[in-house]
Amino acid sequence: MTKATCLIIDDEKLARDLLREYLSSIDEIELLDECAKGSEAVEKINKLKPDLIFLDVQMPGLNGFDVLDEIDHEPYVIFTTAYDQYAIKAFERNAIDYLLKPVDEERFKAAIERALKRKKMEEGRIEDLLGGLREVKPRESYDSHIFVQKSEKLFNLPIEEIIYLEASGDYTIISTKNDQFVSSSGIGKLEEIMNPDTFIRVHRSTIVNVNYLKEIERHFNGGMIVKMQSGKSFPVSRTYAKQIRKKVV
């Protein structure tokens, strides 16, 4: 596996210095640059396309979550922050890890190992996909039902009842009007069996059923948010925004 590239994004110089020191002993990671502001981070992420970013949450101007909303390129994310109240939101954004300052070196190394493992696994999936492209034929139909497990039972779930799917590590949370199920299948695998006219990927970690979509909100900065009839909202990654625009008449 080639070296993974990374950016450090933090408005505190001491925090950047510490992460740079930790990285100096890790041969598998190449540090491309550092950023002290969110706006600068957006520009450099889109330009340098790092595999991994170390991202602070609270920064002047754009905060860490704003940065993720603004970028076109989608790197793996390890949050580094002094505040523990953002952890749930961070993992909802498919973060690799959430490190509290002052960052412990052993925890830092464990987060790096997790990121490298994820990178290797996903690169393997891409190679498998490329190797099988010649055998792929257009689907004439899509599954109408799937079996999902809850407790010790398997439920026969009509796919049309699924409102949205959210990636959670290697698992997928499937939400309907009245229930939630956890699937051991990755979100990409589930996407393959769903009709793309109905199920649209709006983010690397989110697929929504357009039949339950209430409205799309545009932000002044060019970003979008999809709002479901249930009241749940999801940010639209620019990588997948074109799927939404195809529906606009």
Image (spheres, rainbow, N blue to C red):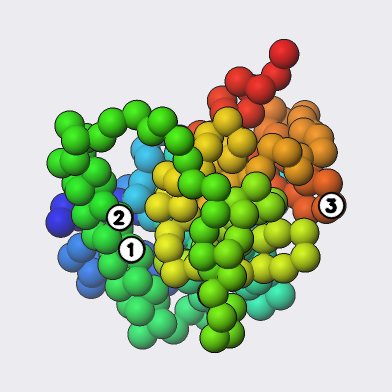
- The mark that comes first in sequence, 3 or 1, is 1
Q: Amino acid at mark 3?
A: Gly
Q: Are marks 3 and 1 in contact (CB under 8 Å)?
A: no
CA distance separating discs 2 and 1: 6 Å
The residue under label 3 is 231
Badge 1 is on which residue?
118
Asked if labels 1 and 2 touch by Cβ distance under 8 angstroms, the answer is: yes
Corner quadrant of residue 158: bottom right
The C terminus sits in image quarter: top right
Taking the image as shown, residue 210 lies to the left or right of residue 5, namely right
Q: Which mark is residue 122?
A: 2
Which mark is first along the chain, 3 or 2? 2
SS category of the residue bearing label 3: loop
Q: Quadrant of the N terminus?
A: bottom left
Other residues around mark 1 within 10 Å, as few (<14) / some (14–19) / many (≥20)? some
Q: Report whether 245 appears left or right of 227.
A: left
| Coordinates of residue 13 in the picture (x, y in percent) | 51, 62
Q: Secondary structure at mark 2?
A: helix
Which amino acid type corresponds to the residue marked 1 in the rendered image? Arg
Residue 160 in the image: x percent, y percent? 65, 47
Residue closest to the eye, 22 or 90: 90
The residue mark sitting in front, 3 or 1, is 3
Residue in the image at 71% along x and 75% along y: 85
Closest to the observer, 184 or 144: 144
Residues at marks 2 and 3, CA–CA distance in whole angstroms:
32 Å
Q: Secondary structure at mark 1?
A: helix
Relative to 243, say whether 3 is above or below. Answer: below
User: Residue 29 appears in which quarter of the rendering?
Assistant: bottom left
